[in-house]
Amino acid sequence: MTRIHRLDASLVNKIAAGEVIERPASVVKELLENAIDAGARTIEIELADGGATLIRVSDDGRGMPSDELPLAIAPHATSKIASVDDLFRVATFGFRGEALASIAAVSQLRLVSRPADQPGGAEIRASDGDVEGPHPAAAPLGTTIEIRNLFFNVPARRKFLRQTGTETGHVTEQIARVALAHPHIAFRQVNQGREVRNLPATGDRRERIADFYGPELAADLFVVRRQERGLTIEGLIAPPAAARATSKWQYVMLNGRYINDRAINYAIREAYRGLVEPSRSPVVFLFLTIDPAAYDVNVHPTKIEVRWREAGLVQSQVLAILRETLLSRDLTPRMAVPAATTTSTDDPERAQRVREAIADFLRSAPPPQRMIEYPAPPRPVAPRIDRFEEATPPAAMHPAEPAVVATPRAEAETTPMTAAAADSAPTRALQIHNTYLVVESTEGVIIVDQHALHERVLYEQLRTRILSGPLEAQRLLLPETLDVSTAQKAAAEQHVELLSRVGIEMSAFGPNSLAVQAFPSFMGNVDVRSFARDLLDRLAEAGHTESEETLVHRVLDMMACKAAVKAGDPLTADEIDALLAQRHLIDRSSNCPHGRPTSLSLSLRDLERQFKRT
């Protein structure tokens, strides 16, 4: 039997390195955080082979005297905490004193530093536990740390490194996280001896976002700002139309530190629920500031997770400000129309084809037998659930709190325009292909998907109605029976109360059958058996993983989708009028409950550009 024994220091450091140092990007993260803790105003990162061969991080921070250099790479040596109490109010990015020791254990490290009060610098080298120095060395103010041949003495780890491009991408992501959180610091990135990024210091977060993700996205972002109970939330968030395929475009910074927090991630998802498709994720840049005593960062070796003292406060405040911001904006996506200019570098044939296509569409539009004119916004009448119910406006749209609509992103933050002002002129609407409604607006043309808009209208009406009690149900003269699986029958039994809330009553009708006894009154044109089967499938799939409220909203989604008018349904002028009236009276009218856009906007400027009127 193997006897218990102490591990040697070299092996202990390699094990510690395995927890903190996963790949070159992990090294860059730790070195950048050390530079910021040292008060750096300029940081330079140089890579070779994606960081596998060389990582060099230089800063102009405070620097370290020569006698402290050996301690800098010693395990559990730090200047950032001194007692247990300090662990519960960590105000720096590093504090454990493990990063440099771990890095030195799995690489060939060289550290050169000079503080402001010394005429010269000092250098120390470390490799696989062997330390040389410190020795005098010429050095500018600040610190340079050079890491060569990462994992050279841990081949099992080195073989897991990916191709240079992949590792460089991970490093760039770490740089982005730090640079977005600290725009007041200048960053320069060099790959394989070539400068790939040079970011001057700036006080504008939007400008720093543009540096990484382009000026087009940065220009479309909405400003977020809220302060409540010691928590300050600032940020820039994208409209739903800019949602991406993954959540990697969501950046949450806490006191300048990038974090991945479940409570905040949930708040983001809920704020955008119904505005983006379930398979896509919104683009969000949030910057939270709070007393360090309000959270514990000593949870994970990489310090990417935190434990809140009041997680509910943080979640509710993030959700509230995101919802308020989204509901106060015009979220109608703009149609991307390529500019047709007269410069010699353009393709004149392509520009001509674009103009001809638009002209052909306008010439081939059906006769305007459904063309109507009405002043907007129209007056609502008493609320009721019908095919096109005219509902009372929600509180957020009350005249005392006008909504912001159709204002260019850059101007919306300072010169909001009310819905009434935006729509004071008469508006004309036309149904084409029995699917889309083309509406003249003060800015140009809005094309509405009649099914998507009606679906959102019905969902919002049902969501409001169910808050005051179960939906109105109608008992069927002849119950509809359907054969069900064991899982479907179990789901019906498990969710009896939920079904009752949405106006559906089911009962057993034999060992493998159910009978639908009552059905929501407003769904008179929906096939009862087909809808019941789909609903039971959805409930069986959810099982116990979702809360009842979440399931209620999913059921309302299904109901609204089934009851809404379909593509291909002809509408009368009155129906078009009633449906379009709802765009100004409901929340989140720019998207259906599944996140698809209900309308697209084509500006008059775009049309004029295509027809060479500018």
Image (tube, rainbow, N blue to C red):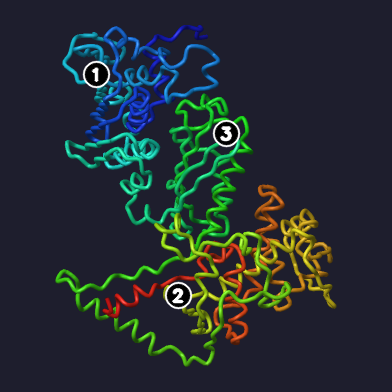
Q: Residue at x 56, y 71 (%)?
A: 452
Q: Work out whether mark 3 precedes mark 1 in sequence or the reverse, and give the earlier one.
A: 1
Seen at 68% across and 63% down, the residue is 556
Q: How many numbered markers are drawn? A: 3
Q: Which mark is residue 442?
A: 2
- Identify the amino acid type marked 3: Gly
Q: Is residue 52 above or below residue 367?
A: above
Nearer the observer, 130 or 154:
130
Mark nearer the N terminus (2 vs 3): 3
Query: Camera-side residue: 581 or 270?
Result: 581
> Which quarter of the rendering shows the C terminus?
bottom left
Callout 2: helix, strand or loop?
Answer: loop
Q: CA distance from mark 2 to mark 3?
A: 43 Å
* Amino acid carrying mark 2 in the image: Thr
Residue closer to the observer: 515 or 192: 192
Task: Tell which tag, 3 or 1, sits nearer the viewer.
Answer: 3
Structural crowding at the residue carrying mark 1, measured as other residues with C-alpha within 10 Å and reported as few (<14), some (14–19) or many (≥20)? some
Helix or strand or loop: what does disc 1 sit on? strand
Can the viewer see residue 243?
Answer: no
Q: Earlier in the sequence, mark 1 or mark 2?
A: 1
Q: Is residue 372 left or right of residue 353?
A: right
> Residues under labels 1 and 2: Cα distance?
64 Å
Q: Position of residue 253 (x, y in %)?
A: 46, 37
Residue 500 lies, in percent from the top left, at 80, 61
Q: CA distance from mark 3 to mark 1?
A: 42 Å
Q: Which residue is mark 3?
A: 230
Q: Is residue 544 left or right of residue 29?
A: right
Residue 301 visible in the shown view: yes
The residue pinned by badge 1 equals: 110
Amino acid type indicated by mark 1: Arg
Mark 3 crowd level (few <14, some 14–19, many ≥20, 10 Å Cα): few
Q: Would you place residue 286 above or below residue 573 in this image?
A: above
